[in-house]
Each structure stands twice: as C-alpha cells, then as structure tokens.
Image (spheres, rainbow, N blue to C red):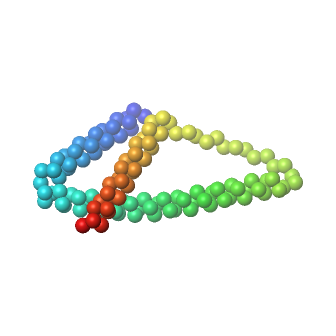
C-alpha cells in the first residue's frame, strides 16, 4: 500500500467521521431530522445487512467447498501407495496497514451490528 493510498484512506475516514458528527448534531437539534435520519439509517443498514449476509453465505459456501476439496485431496494422498510431490505456493501475509484496516472495518461492522440490534429492539418495544 503506497503513501498516496494511505493518505486517501485517512482523508476519507476523516470526512466520514466529520459527516457522521454533523449528522449527529442535526439529529440532536431537530426532532424531524432525527426521525428522518434514523429511518434512513435503519433502511440502509437493513439493506446492507442483507447484502452482507448474502455475500457471507456465498463466501462461506466457497470456503467450505475449498476445505472439502483440500481434505479429500489429503485423504487421497494418504491412501495412495505412490508418493506424490507437491509444490507449495507461498501464502502472502497482508501488510500491517491492510491488517489494521481490516481490524478497523471489523470494529465498524461490529458497531453497525450492535446499532441494528438496538434499533430493532427499540422498534419491537414501540
């Protein structure tokens, strides 16, 4: 990840934080905007949650298929009387910047999930 990409990510993060703060101030100051913004957030979060669930399901199926193939291949190698040499492809570990970004995105996703659950429980109480 080059320095230009890092600067763009930081700039975008700053703008998202600034925009979220401005929206929060609007929500706190204007009850009508509060309801409109909360409805908008709920609808968008529900849509994103559905999309992420679908993507997660596909990814889970792909991962299971890969693991099943890997296990079947290993069993076949163990049961085989002949010795087969395989060449291992090195697995690239992500850079520390990418790992940090993944951790931040995971934390944001956890916060979004908590907010969705909170909104759902509030909706059920109403």
Q: Nearer the viewer, residue 7 or 43?
A: 43
Q: Is 13 left or right of 83, judged from the image as shown?
A: left
Q: Quadrant of residue 51?
A: bottom left
Which residue appears at 38% of the width and 60% of the height? 49
Identify which residue is drawn at 37% across, 55% down: 113
Give the quarter of the figure containing the C terminus. Answer: bottom left
- Inspect this view and state whether residue 44 appears: no
Q: Residue at x 68, y 55 (%)?
A: 70
Q: Residue furthest front?
A: 125
Judge whether 20 appears above or below 31 on screen. Answer: above
The residue closer to the viewer here, 57 or 111, is 111
Q: Quadrant of the N terminus?
A: top left
Q: Residue sitting at 73 percent across and 44 percent down?
A: 87
Residue 6 lies, in percent from the top left, at 38, 36
Q: Is residue 4 left or right of residue 26?
A: right
Q: Position of residue 80 (x, y in %)?
A: 84, 55
Q: Is residue 10 left or right of residue 80?
A: left
Q: Residue furthest right?
A: 81
The answer to whether residue 24 is seen in the rendering is yes
69, 87: nearer the viewer = 69
Q: Quadrant of residue 100?
A: top left
- Give the x, y percent position of residue 12: 31, 42
In the rendered view, would you say 121 is above or below 4? below
């Amino acid at each position: 990840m080059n320095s230009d990409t890092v600067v763009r990510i930081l700039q975008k993060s700053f703008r998202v934080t600034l925009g979220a703060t401005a929206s929060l101030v609007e929500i706190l100051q204007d009850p009508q905007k509060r309801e409109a913004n909360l409805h908008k957030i709920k609808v968008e979060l529900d849509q994103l949650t559905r999309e992420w669930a679908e993507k997660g399901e596909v990814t889970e199926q792909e991962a299971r298929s890969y693991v099943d193939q890997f296990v079947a291949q290993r069993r076949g190698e163990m049961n085989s009387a002949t010795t087969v040499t395989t060449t291992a492809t090195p697995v690239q570990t992500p850079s520390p910047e990418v790992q940090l970004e993944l951790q931040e995105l995971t934390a944001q996703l956890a916060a979004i999930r908590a907010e969705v659950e909170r909104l759902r429980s509030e909706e059920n109480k109403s």
